[in-house]
Image (cartoon, rainbow, N blue to C red):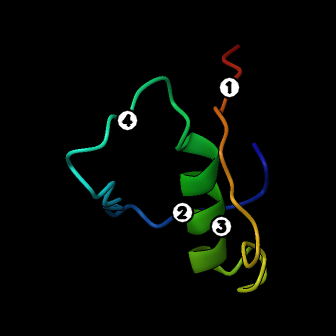
Amino acid sequence: MFGLGVAPKRITVNLASADLPKEEGHFELAIALGVLIEMGAAPSHAGEGFAVMGSWAWMVR
């Protein structure tokens, strides 16, 4: 869809600390940015100096 391929393996995301509520998908955009950085699709400094929060809406056809 976007021209990026992901190897068929598991990606584990640690949402520590467990005592904080994690509701309503506020972490989806930050997780997506982290995965893009680790894949090399975004520069390693792309998230430096920013707080990234937001929901990711998937379009399904």
Image spot of residue 58 (x, y percent): 66, 26
Identify the disc placed on residue 36.
Answer: 3
- The numbered mark, 2 or 4, whose residue comes first in the sequence reads 2
Q: Quadrant of the C terminus?
A: top right
Label 4 amino acid? Lys
Which element type, helix, strand or loop, lies under badge 4? loop
What residue does disc 2 label?
6
The quadrant in which residue 4 appears is bottom right
Identify the disc placed on residue 57.
Answer: 1
- The numbered mark, 4 or 3, whose residue comes first in the sequence reads 4
Distance, label 2 to label 4, CA atoms, is: 26 Å
Q: In which quarter of the image is the N terminus?
A: top right
* Above or below: residue 42 compared with residue 22: below
Image spot of residue 54 (x, y percent): 67, 38
Crowd rating for badge 3 (residues with CA inside 10 Å; few <14, some 14–19, many 20+): some
In this orientation, which residue lies closer to the viewer: 11 or 46?
A: 46
Which element type, helix, strand or loop, lies under badge 2? loop
Which element type, helix, strand or loop, lies under badge 1? loop
Crowd rating for badge 2 (residues with CA inside 10 Å; few <14, some 14–19, many 20+): few
The quadrant in which residue 17 appears is bottom left
* For residue 15, side relative to residue 53 (left or right): left
What residue does disc 4 label?
22
Label 3 amino acid? Leu
The reply to whether the C-beta atoms of the residues labelled 1 and 2 are less than 8 Å apart is no
